[in-house]
Image (spheres, rainbow, N blue to C red):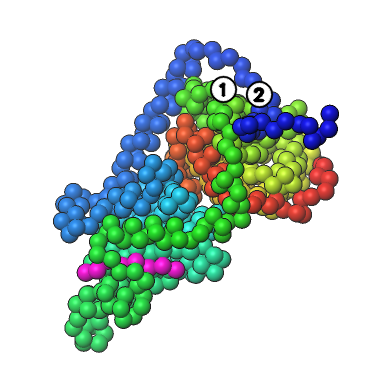
């Protein structure tokens, strides 16, 4: 038969889901026993605690402060965000626990931040919470805004900033040295084609004025928004001039005289509507490198064979208890299909390719400590993912590299160094999820915060430190005993036990997921059952841009 004789179907065939080309990841049947039930109960308790703590940091100030704010005709920060987003848009809230339980910090750093759809465009949305200490910039807010800006820059997301801040926190004025970086970052983002729109809702003095002043688009509300470098008290002290905030930097003045404002509106709803118009006018589909990704034919959703809720039965709430990372992989991948790479070599590390929410991804997960063979395999896999231009997902549950004479002789340092080099020089986007422990050099090898993953999330039971509390306290105790023995001094067992207990408590506290998240060392603590949705959303963000691996990883990438 000639090709010309082939019949064309009247209706186009739906493309088959690409995951169907991969093998199913088979799991052993789950035997429900008291241990499984106890683990589920423990996981549910962790999630309940997460929900309660999340509610506490969603606080937008005292009831009295909120009522006063509303009486002025102003919307609360989260209501402003809700108006900005498209109806039914997903919203990936980021760094929610910034400043949590830190002295002199406010819930969420007095800032709401996350990614959602605005005028059908994935957008970084940031809003000051003025009902929390005037949204003055404390160290948590500084770290959070810088991280949100970094995410927008790396993923090429336009930013809409709902500005309503009293400026720098004078009680933490020294943080100015770090806080001023956000203006540098804004300028470099604009130079790189990542635009920012600022909507000014209230009085924003000093540092609060620079973000609108440096934005690509600035919207101000008549008789409500004001911008000035020095407010009336400072002006009077410095020059003796008496003036009002409106006379000094009112919206109408900036729209008609100074030119700082590009758009003057009458109320908050109009202001947010103008911000949505601005996003719509960006022609963003044509500015991203893969506009076709937004118009590709979508296949039917292919759900995993195993429910996310059943993850609570198998993922250990107690990180000291081992579990197979394949249990998670089978619950987040499309159709539970996974093409394992080198499954019989370096068996403590699982590597392979899959699809999540229709997007290709390479997955690296831990089933124990890293041996030299695990490091070699993972290095090779990272090179392959770069050759294939496929993003990488790191699932952390690792206590570190295996130690001892045998493993040192086998090349732990050599192959560990090659692995860390591969992680650092990989150019495909990385996502890290800390699902258990992530200790020491293992954290480096699995793309911890220091290795700049595009996104990093933690489960409630996740722990990050140089080593676990038991091991670290034990090592310190052994070192101290050795020092005492060498100097000929007696060991005071009571004193040593107290010091060991104190060190154990310190490491337990500082390795806790909430402690790390408070310091913006992750992008959020997530319910384990939402892992597939979060990963899929991140991959959707990556898909807007052409992914290009490190060309230096080409060629034969053997060990």
SS for tag 1? Answer: loop
Give whichever of discs 2 and 1 has the lower sequence position: 2
Report the residue marked by disc 2.
Answer: 24
Q: Is residue 48 visible?
A: yes
Residue 519 at what x, y percent from top left? 44, 51
- Pick whichever, 11 or 347, lies toward us: 11
Residue 538 at what x, y percent from top left? 53, 44
- Pick whichever, 30 or 116, lies toward us: 116
Overall secondary structure of the magenta section: strand
Give the side of residue 357 with respect to residue 141, left or right.
Answer: right
Report how far apart the C-alphas of labels 2 and 1 lie in the structure. Answer: 9 Å
Q: Which quarter of the rendered picture does the C terminus lie within? A: top right
SS for tag 2? Answer: loop
Residue at image position (64%, 52%) is 546
> Please, is residue 204 above or below residue 139 in the view?
below
The magenta stretch is 216-223
Number of numbered tags placed on the structure image: 2
Does the magenta-highlighted stretch encompass residue 220?
yes
Dot 2 and dot 1 residues touching (CB under 8 Å): yes
Residue at image position (46%, 22%) is 39
Give the side of residue 363 with respect to residue 538, left or right.
Answer: right
For label 2, the crowd category at 10 Å Cα-Cα, with few meaning under 14, some 14 to 19 and many 20 or more, is some
Give the side of residue 23 with respect to residue 263, left or right.
Answer: right
Q: Quadrant of residue 482?
A: top right
Q: Residue furthest front?
A: 5
Residue at image position (54%, 27%) is 303
- Pick whichever, 309 or 234, lies toward us: 309
Report the residue marked by disc 1.
Answer: 305
Q: Which quarter of the rendered picture does the N terminus lie within? A: top right
């Amino acid at each position: 038969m000639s090709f010309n004789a082939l019949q064309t179907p009247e209706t186009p065939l739906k493309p088959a889901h690409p995951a169907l080309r991969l093998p199913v990841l088979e799991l052993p049947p789950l035997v429900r026993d008291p241990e499984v039930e106890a683990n589920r109960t423990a996981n549910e308790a962790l999630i309940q605690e997460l929900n309660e703590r999340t509610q506490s940091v969603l606080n937008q100030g005292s009831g009295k402060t909120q009522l006063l704010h509303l009486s002025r005709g102003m919307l609360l920060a989260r209501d402003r965000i809700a108006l900005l987003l498209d109806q039914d848009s997903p919203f990936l809230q980021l760094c929610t626990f910034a400043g949590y339980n830190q002295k002199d910090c406010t819930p969420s750093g007095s800032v709401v931040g996350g990614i959602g759809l605005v005028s059908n465009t994935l957008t970084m949305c940031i809003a000051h919470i003025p009902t929390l200490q005037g949204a003055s910039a404390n160290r948590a807010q500084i770290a959070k805004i810088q991280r949100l800006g970094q995410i927008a820059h790396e993923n090429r997301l336009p930013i809409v900033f709902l500005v309503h801040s009293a400026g720098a926190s004078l009680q933490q004025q020294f943080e100015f040295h770090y806080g001023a970086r956000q203006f540098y970052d804004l300028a470099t983002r604009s130079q790189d084609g990542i635009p920012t729109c600022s909507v000014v809702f209230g009085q924003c003095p000093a540092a609060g004025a620079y973000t609108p002043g440096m934005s690509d688009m600035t919207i101000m509300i008549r008789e409500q928004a004001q911008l000035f470098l020095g407010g009336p008290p400072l002006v009077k002290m410095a020059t003796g001039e008496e003036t009002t905030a409106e006379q000094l930097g009112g919206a109408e003045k900036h729209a008609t005289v100074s030119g700082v404002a590009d758009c003057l509106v009458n109320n908050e709803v109009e202001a947010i509507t103008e911000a949505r118009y601005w996003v719509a006018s960006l022609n963003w589909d044509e500015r991203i490198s893969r506009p076709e990704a937004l118009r590709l034919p979508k296949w039917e959703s292919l759900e995993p064979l195993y429910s996310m809720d059943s993850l609570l039965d198998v993922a250990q709430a107690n990180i000291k208890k081992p579990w197979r990372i394949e249990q998670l992989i089978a619950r987040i991948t499309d159709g539970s299909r996974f093409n394992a790479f080198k499954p019989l070599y370096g068996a403590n590390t699982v590597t392979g390719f899959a699809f999540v929410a229709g997007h290709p991804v390479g997955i690296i997960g831990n089933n124990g400590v890293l041996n030299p063979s695990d490091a070699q395999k993972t290095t090779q896999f990272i090179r392959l993912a770069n050759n294939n231009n496929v993003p990488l997902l790191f699932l952390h549950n690792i206590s570190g590299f295996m130690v001892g004479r045998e493993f040192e002789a086998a090349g732990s340092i050599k192959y560990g160094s090659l692995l860390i080099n591969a992680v650092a020089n990989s150019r495909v986007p990385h996502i890290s999820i800390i699902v258990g422990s992530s200790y020491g050099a293992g954290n480096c090898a699995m793309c911890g915060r220091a290795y700049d993953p595009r996104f990093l999330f933690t489960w409630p039971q996740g722990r990050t430190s140089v080593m676990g509390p038991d091991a670290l306290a034990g090592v310190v105790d052994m070192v101290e005993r050795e020092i005492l023995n060498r100097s000929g001094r007696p060991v005071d067992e009571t004193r040593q036990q107290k010091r060991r207990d104190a060190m154990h408590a310190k490491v337990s506290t500082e390795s806790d997921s909430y402690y790390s998240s408070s310091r913006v060392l992750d992008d959020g603590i997530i319910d384990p059952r939402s892992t597939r949705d979060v990963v899929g959303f991140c991959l959707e963000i990556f898909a807007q841009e052409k992914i290009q691996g490190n060309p230096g990883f080409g060629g034969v990438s053997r060990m």
